[in-house]
Image (cartoon, rainbow, N blue to C red):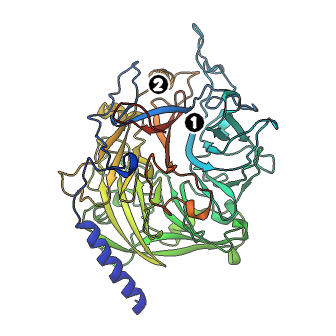
């Protein structure tokens, strides 16, 4: 190892050890009015999954929620999609006595608005040239829709009902329907919204302008095609992409899946124009069990599921050396769409169990990235907690081309299927569950959002994450859950928490997530999430004052 690299690794190791030895989390710590500490109390339990029974969302008693957009709200400029959360291929609510059949849908396809991106912008337009559209906007890609096509919408937080939600795009610049869209972020270097799609054989990365209609381009020839979900930029214009692709089920372990997803980094030749190309790299983690890296085992599915490497990755206190391996360089290989997942495997990238999302930790100058792995989303997984069957949270400390990886939290059946995330402040981050209907039924518990303290040692069983949201289930999701699989009911069942997003809306490079330390509910910082499936409501979370009123 080069001397300068060895020195950098030693410094990172010292920092990593210091992170693992600090004091545990304090449940009452928080940001209150006027900078004073504010209490965040844990919700006692998740909402149970009961057949045919709806339930409200339950937030920490210091918090409240208000609707930012409702799925049944009509778009100001209807196209193939007329409503925020519903397609045009059926009624939003089944009509009394309407009988489903193989060719008749008794309800519309839910469009499932996903990751939220909040921006404060001037001079934005819509379909009405005489209307003042304000300055506060929330953007989403939609993960579903009739025909399996996605959409891009904008919620105008300043507008009246007629102009509240705008359809930005249904097709790309080549007049092709958009793929289903999942993750999103604002890329200020080029002035584009970036959207990811988990449909790895289709367009995986799209860039979109802020115009209405938006000009949407497929840039998968630059960044590759893979099951991308999370996407974040640092202040040099580099991107980290997190992939969500489920692996094969084992033969000896029929309820567990092979790690099959990767963490990527893209180094742009010109951040002001991503189409100028660059290098895509995959994260490679050095094994503690053998010489070389932790790699994908191919046909050895069972061996991968319960390997010593997986056990080591999910053991508190272990610190792994990492590096980035280039898997595609447009200067050499051109800019035709390519299979990034296959290239990552061929180059010896390290696979994880569906690492869906991550963010840069504020106050670290983009040198620390925290991401999750969803796991098997099955209480019967033979991998258990020990081998990552219920997922995990990892900390990646970056130093140029090298880095260190360590475990923050090893999930269990009660805290599993972690997905979207967002930093609450400098040291605490929220991860939300997407456990799925099967695990909901197995544990009789719907999804929750948890606040994790990165200065806590979760290897100590007395330290627990704080449940700040116990998600409920709205009436349309209750109906879908009850009749899921029957002809005419094509929508997912239980509600899902998605699009957890805290930002001050700054559209400059200084507003990148991770550039500033968040101060929730103060100094322009706002917090949103989407209750996906069902009625597809997007909520803004507010803090209550002592009288119980909401704060602006």
Nearer-the-camera pick, 226 or 494:
494
Give the Cα separation between the discs numbered 1 and 2: 14 Å
Q: Secondary structure at mark 1?
A: loop
Residue 468's quadrant in the figure?
Answer: top left
Q: Is residue 301 left or right of residue 488?
A: left
Residue lying at the far front in this picture: please name it: 34
Residue 389 visible somewhere in the drawing = no
The image position of residue 99, as x and y in percent, is 59, 12
> Which residue position holds label 2?
474
Nearer-the-camera pick, 426 or 205:
426
In this picture, is 371 found above or below 367? above
Q: Secondary structure at mark 2?
A: loop
Image quadrant where one finds the N terminus? bottom left
Q: How many residues crowd mark 1 within 10 Å: few (<14), some (14–19), many (20+)?
A: many
Residue 104's quadrant in the figure?
Answer: top right
The image position of residue 110, as x and y in percent, is 59, 30
Q: Is residue 125 left or right of residue 441?
A: right
Q: Is residue 302 left or right of residue 182?
A: left
Disc on res. 112: 1
Name the residue: 41% across, 21% down. Answer: 54
Name the residue: 52% across, 49% down. Answer: 524
The image position of residue 343, as x and y in percent, is 57, 67
Q: How many marks?
A: 2
Name the residue: 80% across, 35% down. Answer: 128
């Amino acid at each position: 190892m080069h001397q300068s690299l060895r020195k950098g690794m030693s410094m990172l190791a010292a920092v990593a050890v210091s992170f693992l030895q600090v004091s545990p989390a304090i449940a009452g710590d928080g940001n209150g009015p006027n900078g004073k500490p504010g209490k965040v109390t844990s919700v006692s339990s998740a909402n149970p999954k009961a057949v045919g029974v709806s339930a409200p969302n339950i937030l920490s008693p210091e918090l409240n929620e208000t609707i930012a957009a409702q799925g049944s709200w009509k778009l100001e400029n209807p196209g193939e999609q007329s409503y925020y959360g519903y397609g045009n291929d059926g009624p939003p609510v089944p009509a009394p006595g309407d009988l489903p059949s193989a060719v008749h849908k008794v309800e519309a396809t839910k469009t499932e608005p996903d990751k939220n991106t909040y921006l404060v912008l001037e001079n934005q337009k819509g379909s009405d040239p005489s209307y003042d559209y304000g300055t506060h906007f929330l953007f989403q890609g939609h993960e579903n829709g009739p025909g399996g096509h996605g959409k891009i919408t904008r919620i105008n937080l300043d507008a009246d009902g007629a102009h509240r939600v705008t359809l930005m795009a249904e097709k790309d610049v080549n007049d092709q329907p958009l793929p289903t869209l999942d993750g999103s972020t604002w890329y200020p270097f080029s002035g584009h919204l970036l959207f990811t799609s988990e449909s790895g054989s289709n367009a995986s990365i799209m860039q979109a302008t802020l115009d209405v209609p938006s000009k949407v381009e497929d840039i998968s020839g630059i960044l590759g095609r893979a099951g991308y979900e999370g996407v974040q930029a640092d202040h040099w214009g580099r991107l980290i992409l997190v992939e969500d692709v489920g692996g094969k089920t084992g033969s000896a372990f029929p309820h567990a899946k092979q790690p099959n997803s990767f963490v990527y980094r893209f180094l742009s030749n010109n951040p002001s124009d991503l189409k100028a190309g660059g290098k895509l790299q995959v994260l490679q983690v050095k094994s503690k069990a053998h010489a070389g890296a932790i790699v994908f085992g191919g046909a050895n599915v069972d061996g991968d599921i319960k390997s010593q490497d997986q056990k080591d990755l999910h053991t508190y206190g272990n610190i792994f050396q990492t590096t980035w391996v280039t898997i595609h360089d447009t200067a050499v290989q051109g800019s035709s769409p390519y299979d990034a997942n296959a290239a990552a495997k061929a180059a010896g990238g390290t696979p994880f169990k569906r690492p869906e999302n991550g963010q840069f930790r504020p106050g670290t100058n983009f040198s620390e990235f925290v991401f999750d792995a969803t796991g098997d989303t099955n209480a019967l997984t033979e991998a258990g907690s020990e081998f990552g069957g219920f997922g995990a949270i990892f900390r990646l400390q970056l130093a140029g081309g090298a880095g260190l990886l360590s475990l923050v939290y090893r999930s269990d059946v009660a805290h599993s299927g972690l997905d979207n995330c967002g930093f609450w402040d400098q040291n605490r981050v929220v991860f939300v569950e997407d456990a799925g209907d099967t695990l909901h039924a197995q544990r009789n518990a719907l999804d929750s959002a948890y606040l994790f303290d990165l200065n806590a040692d979760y290897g100590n069983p007395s330290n627990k994450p704080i449940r700040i949201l116990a998600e409920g289930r709205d009436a349309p999701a209750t109906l879908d859950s009850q009749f899921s699989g029957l002809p005419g009911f094509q929508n997912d069942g239980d509600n899902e928490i998605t699009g957890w997003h805290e930002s001050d809306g700054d559209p400059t490079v200084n507003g990148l997530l991770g550039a500033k330390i968040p101060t929730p509910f103060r100094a322009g910082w706002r917090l949103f999430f989407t209750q996906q499936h069902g009625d597809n409501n997007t909520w803004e979370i507010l803090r209550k004052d002592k009288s119980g009123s909401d704060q602006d």
